Image: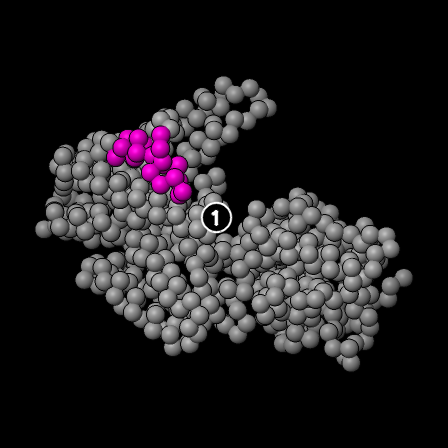
């Protein structure tokens, strides 16, 4: 790995150390025996960020195979969260089993092999057509369109979307690392922007963007996009985009990611669940944490490919 | 003094320490598999996970029901909890007998009246008197219809009358009929939730049918998420 990776790892570790110390300082001001939920939630969040950063760093050190494996497992957990709530009948058992145990591994295998001609169309074309045929062959017209459409939707978000994060490594970009560090760039910009959006959105309570779905408002969204652009500019040395290009790419990635979290909030609201699962202590499921990144990854991949790929 | 049950019903715990180690190791594997595939989660809604003597009575839609409940119990509770299961199923092959009798340490009872050598209720009460908690499926067989629950058998009532100190805990398993429908081989990795409700007891003078209906209602009430 290059000096860029080492520098980035040090910077992230330093930032997380500062956040950990802040959390401990906040905790120290709480009288003994009492618990302030906000402080505890912040401490849990920082701990989860450490776990994410360490997992991602280890995967990046292992190279493409490590990153592909990490996101394949993440996609598996995410698909499990969505498939738990989608419409299905007994006749879909084979199609769903194939989604988990064939489509998902194959998609990540194609990414690992670096075949963009295959992994960009495998799920939207072949799986889209094939799984609905499979469900049709088993009969049962009851809620047929809802069943096949919801399965396909789950695959697009959780497998297609998630797989475009490791797919960034396969981009033929200038520079010693190619697209590898773009993964860190994308995740830091989107997660950082989401945090800024959350903080500012709670401070400036104004009319929500979609009141029936989520309390998010335009103040928060604007602050999030601005924060992502700033993070993008600061991290432009990880990318071939240049400072302005990196700020723009990060801003677009966050805007699409925020839109994605709104879409996922609509699905949760419809199915009557607060969190997608309880996998991450204190923060719900994989999709509650990474749904925005999954949503934005194919767009980010495509824009990077269009604009900068050799 | 309760006499020792016939060998078919309670195969002795293996004396061989290697076999016992194998059973424990396989048991850990079952827990790991349940958690890795279905991310099964316990919701202790009505009671805390305390080491008290209990009968967890649950809905039964899939062969994976019992391993799921068994897996979400904390280890110190799991060690003293035994499923009540059908001898005619679990003693059919040597592999099933290993799982049924040694991994899960099932209280194996005979469902076919003509093959019985003693009263299944005595076998169950004996396991309770030995200090075990139990997992019980009072519907008696897998529910593959659309009704949430089949009518309960009398066993739960008899346990409540004979051993009033044992807590009867309604235990709802959600999603398993989608994870592993009858006849399918590959389980779908969907998220399963096991919800433990507040214990029920047989009130003084309560009729069998009234109690069983009430117990079934307590279980069915756990279907809705909080």
In the visual, does B128 lie left or right of A150? right
Where residue B148 sits: x, y (%)? Answer: 61, 63
Specify start and end residues of the magenta stretch as a single range: A206-225
Classify residue B215 by image quadrant.
bottom right
In the visual, does A298 lie left or right of B203? left
Residue B221 visible in image: yes
Where residue B83 sits: x, y (%)? Answer: 68, 61
Tell me what residue is drawn at x 60 percent, y 72 percent.
Answer: B95
How is colour applied across the structure in the image? one colour
Q: Is residue B56 above or below residue A10?
A: below
In this view, the residue farthest toward the bottom is B114
- Mark 1 is surrounded, within 10 Å at the Cα level, by few (under 14), some (14 to 19) or many (20 or more) other residues, namely some
Q: Is residue A212 magenta?
A: yes
Residue B31 visible in image: no
Circle 1 chain: A
Where residue A252 sits: x, y (%)? Answer: 22, 41
In the visual, does A185 lie left or right of A270? left
Tell me what residue is drawn at x 77 percent, y 72 percent.
Answer: B7
Tell me what residue is drawn at x 19 percent, y 51 percent.
Answer: A302
Please, what is the dominant secondary structure of the magenta stretch?
Answer: loop
In this view, the residue farthest toward the left is A310
Q: Nearer the viewer, residue B147 or B177?
A: B147
Where residue A78 sits: x, y (%)? Answer: 40, 52
Which residue corresponds to mark 1?
A273
Q: Is residue B74 above or below residue A53?
A: below
Tell me what residue is drawn at x 47 percent, y 27 percent.
Answer: A39
Q: Nearer the viewer, residue B79 or A303?
A: A303
Q: Quadrant of the N terminus of chain B?
A: bottom right
Q: Is residue B60 magenta?
A: no
Q: Nearer the viewer, residue B211 or B104?
A: B211
């Amino acid at each position: 790995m290059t000096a860029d990776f080492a520098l980035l790892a040090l910077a992230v570790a330093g930032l997380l150390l500062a956040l950990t110390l802040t959390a401990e300082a906040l905790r120290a001001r709480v009288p003994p025996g009492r618990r302030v939920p906000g402080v505890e939630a912040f401490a849990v969040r920082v701990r989860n960020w450490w776990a994410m950063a360490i997992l991602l760093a280890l995967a990046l050190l292992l190279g493409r195979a490590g990153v592909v494996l990490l996101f394949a497992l993440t996609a598996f957990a995410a698909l499990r969260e969505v498939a738990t709530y989608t419409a299905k009948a007994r006749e879909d058992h084979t199609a769903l089993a194939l989604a988990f145990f064939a489509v998902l591994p194959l998609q990540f295998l194609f990414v690992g092999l670096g075949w963009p001609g295959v992994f960009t169309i495998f799920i939207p074309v072949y799986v889209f057509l094939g799984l609905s045929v499979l469900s049709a062959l088993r009969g049962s017209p009851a809620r047929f369109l809802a069943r096949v459409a919801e399965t396909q939707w789950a695959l697009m978000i959780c497998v297609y979307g998630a797989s475009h994060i490791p797919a960034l490594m396969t981009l033929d970009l200038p520079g010693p690392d190619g697209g590898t560090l773009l993964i860190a760039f994308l995740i830091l910009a989107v997660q950082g922007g989401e945090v800024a959006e959350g903080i500012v959105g709670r401070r400036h309570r104004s009319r929500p963007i979609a009141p029936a779905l989520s309390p998010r408002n335009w103040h928060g969204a604007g602050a999030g996009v601005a924060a992502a652009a700033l993070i993008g500019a600061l991290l432009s040395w990880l990318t071939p985009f240049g400072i302005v290009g990196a700020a723009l790419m990060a801003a677009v990635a966050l805007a699409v990611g925020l839109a994605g979290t709104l879409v996922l909030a609509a699905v949760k609201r419809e199915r009557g669940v607060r969190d997608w699962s309880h996998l991450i202590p204190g923060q719900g499921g994989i999709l509650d944490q990474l749904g925005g990144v999954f949503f934005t990854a194919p767009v980010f991949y495509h824009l990077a490919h269009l604009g900068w790929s050799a | 003094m309760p006499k020792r049950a016939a060998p078919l019903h309670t195969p002795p715990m293996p004396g061989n320490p290697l076999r016992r180690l194998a059973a424990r190791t396989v048991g850990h594997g079952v827990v790991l598999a349940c958690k890795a595939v279905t991310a099964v989660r316990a919701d202790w809604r009505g009671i805390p996970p305390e080491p008290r003597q209990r009968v967890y009575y649950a809905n039964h839609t899939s062969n994976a029901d019992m391993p799921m409940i068994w897996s979400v119990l904390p280890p110190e509770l799991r060690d003293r909890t035994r499923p009540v299961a059908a001898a005619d199923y679990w003693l059919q092959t040597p592999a099933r007998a290993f799982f049924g009798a040694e991994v899960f340490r099932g209280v194996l009872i005979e469902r076919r009246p003509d093959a019985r050598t003693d009263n299944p209720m005595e076998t169950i009460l004996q396991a309770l008197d030995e200090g075990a908690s139990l997992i019980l499926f009072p519907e008696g067989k897998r529910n593959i219809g659309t009704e949430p629950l089949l009518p309960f058998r009398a066993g739960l009532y008899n346990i409540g009358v004979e051993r009033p100190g044992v807590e009867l805990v309604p235990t709802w398993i959600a999603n398993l009929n989608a994870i592993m429908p009858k006849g399918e081989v590959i389980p779908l990795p969907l998220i399963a939730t096991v919800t433990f409700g507040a214990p029920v007891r047989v009130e003084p003078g309560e009729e069998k049918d009234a109690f069983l209906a009430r117990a079934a209602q307590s279980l069915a009430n756990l279907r809705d998420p909080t």
